[in-house]
Image (tube, helix red, strand yellow):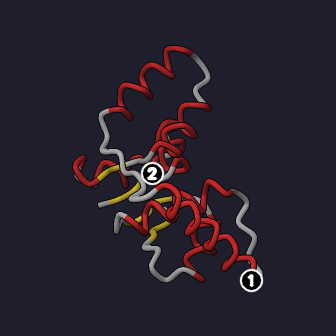
Amino acid sequence: MYLIDSSVWIDGINGKAKTVKFLRQLSPEALGINLLIYTEVLQGASTQKLLNVQQSYLSAQPFYGFQNDKISHQQAANIYRKCHQNGITPRSTIDCLIAQCAIENDLILLHNDKDFVKIASVMPNLQQTAI
């Protein structure tokens, strides 16, 4: 099972051939998102029509959440701190939360974002694949 990051959804929406081909090879049941990814994708919709299409499609995907919001956010903060202690500064707190969601739900994070590769270098329990 995959947690599909907004970077991948956006590349797919924009028709990047490599991303579209990769996503089409996956079983639809293997794709999932969380509320943070959902928000990131929708905020980039350039028209109301595109927003409606994205909402309809993404709403049909499995959504993964946190097991315990408070503890999960603490763990995401620990991801950030561990990265910083190792000379890595993630550009986004949201990326740390997305990584924590993938870890908690034992999902492979599918992305097109160098920050996740850096996070995984200090968080070996983050399964990730870059397109």
Q: Residues within 10 Å of mark 2 (few under 14, many from 20)?
A: many
Tell me the residue that label 2 is attached to.
19
User: In screen coordinates, is 82 left or right of 65?
Assistant: right
Which residue is at the front of the view, 16 or 51? 51
Which residue is at the front of the view, 73 or 28? 73
Tell me the kind of residue under disc 1. Gln
Q: Residue at x 67, y 57 (%)?
A: 93
Outermost residue toward the top? 48
User: In screen coordinates, is 43 left or right of 108?
Assistant: right
Which residue is at the front of the view, 48 or 98? 98
Q: Residue at x 56, y 58 (%)?
A: 97
Tell me the kind of residue under disc 2. Thr
Q: Secondary structure at mark 2?
A: helix
Q: Secondary structure at mark 1?
A: helix
Of discs 2 and 1, which sits in the foreground? 1
Where is residue 75 shown, x and y percent of the image? Answer: 55, 69
The circle on residue 85 is 1
